[in-house]
Amino acid sequence: MAMNVLGVGSGLDLNEILDKLEASEKNRLTPIKAQQKAVNNKISGFGKLKSALSTFNSATAKLQKKELFQARTVIGSDNYFTSTVSSNAQLGNYVINVEQLATAHSVTTNAINDKNIALGNNNSTRTITIQQANGNRLDISLAEDETSLESIANAINQAQIVNADGSTSDSTVNATIVRSGTNSYQLVITSKETGEQQAITSISSDDNNLNSLIGFDINQPSTSAMSQVVEAKNAKFNFNGIAINSSSNTVKDVIPGVDINLKAVTTTPQNLTITADNEKAQAALKEWVEAFNQLKSTISTLTKFTPSEANSDKLNDDNGPLIGNSTLRNIDQSIRSIFAKGQTGEYSVLAQIGINMDNNGNLVIKESQLEDVLKENSEAVATLFTGNGETGIANEIFAKVSSFIDRNGSIDNATDGLNTTLKSLDKRYEQINDSIDKTIDLYRAQFTRLDVLINELNSLSTYLTSQFDMMANLKK
């Protein structure tokens, strides 16, 4: 309210004078604002630097895996077998002949016209025993009302093997009911796994009625109640002329790093070719180079120097926020020093594998040279990056960059220091701003008193002037 009537008594524009004084006082905040802006720009700059370093380190981490440079591609006949290879598989051409596939043993009962009718005797309990060539023995206890085909199948599937130590394990056979015709059902018992050692050697029961239905002896098939429908067989095949016998159609480590899944008997020899897959390594190296160049671009932007105008005592506003910063300079030099350092191995520097640094500090890939060295000696390329697990370009760079970007690393320490400075500046700004407000309040009070005084003096002057005029008129 006082501002609105200030100057009414004096006739002076005291509000304008007060505004100019306040603007002059506010100039005391200008240096602090400039410092706050500079500190905020530095904090933002370190955020951008940390992001670029994180991206670079993620790309570097991929090069720490030696398996990347040992990737394999396998070519074979999917009609007869499929193959998977790991990084330790030896390159080469192999010939495969599949003579026989592994099969799971399967036996069946004669047909019964009702799968739910009781087939056992009148005893309250009975036991069915199933034995296999591998020594497994499965005992199934059945109550008087559990002797139908359906009940027997369910009991077999739920039973467990009791081991010598008293522990239990899942059964290695299963049972199912097959509807083989109108009102015709058969119980089929099958080993869960393939191979001769999984063969069902005998099935018997202390219930003579059941025994006449499910009794089986692999050595006496002609007198057995159940009949064999699928013989238990091992897989037989030749790998480069070497005969191999396997209980499963999936054969692990036929040679180190090579697994084969047999699908069908071959009619002619089939080829299996293992070659190096360098595309993954090339893609990872390209990603790494691009990430470094982006990091270098970020550093250049953050440290950009633009000369000030002639005779100017102010820095150019286009300068990077981290120009001259020791933390950033140390980060840049540390990474470059690893590039320059020679590694132990056939290839000691990046230039030997086709990765060079141009005049602008960017990495450039010579595609043909990199492709050739990966094809000729991918193991040496792997050693250049992975070393002994601690040495190597990738391991050393990852460790160094991690020390910059991890919690309490160099960047966090620098940012924490800047945040402390910013808080101090904010407090100082608040203190000076409060001081300015108090000064302006003091000026306003003084102007108010001046306005009142001038108004009083003007009133006195008017009064005296009127008195003098009256006296002058009396003398006339």
Image: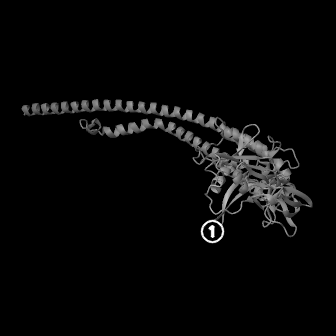
- In front of the other: 433 or 407: 407
Q: Residue furthest right?
A: 241
Left or right of 370 in this view: 113:
left
| Mark 1 surroundings within 10 Å by alpha-carbon count, few (fewer than 14), some (14 through 19), many (20 or more) | few
Mark 1 lies on residue: 182
Quarter of the image with the C terminus in it? top left
Image spot of residue 310 (x, y percent):
60, 47
Image spot of residue 328 (x, y percent):
67, 41
Residue at horizontal 62 percent and vertical 48 percent from the top:
144
Task: Relative to 373, say whether 428 is above or below.
Answer: above
Residue at horizontal 43 percent and vertical 33 percent from the top:
433
For the question of whether residue 366 can be seen, the reply is no
Residue at horizontal 19 percent and vertical 32 percent from the top:
459
- In front of the other: 18 or 454: 18
How many tags in the picture?
1
Image quadrant assignment for residue 330 = top right
- In front of the other: 438 or 104: 104
Image quadrant assignment for residue 47 = top right
Task: Relative to 452, say whether 98 is above or below.
Answer: below
Left or right of 36 in this view: 188:
right
Quarter of the image with the N terminus in it? top left
Image spot of residue 220 (x, y percent):
82, 57
Image quadrant assignment for residue 441 = top left
Element marked by disc 1: loop
Left or right of 21 in this view: 244:
right
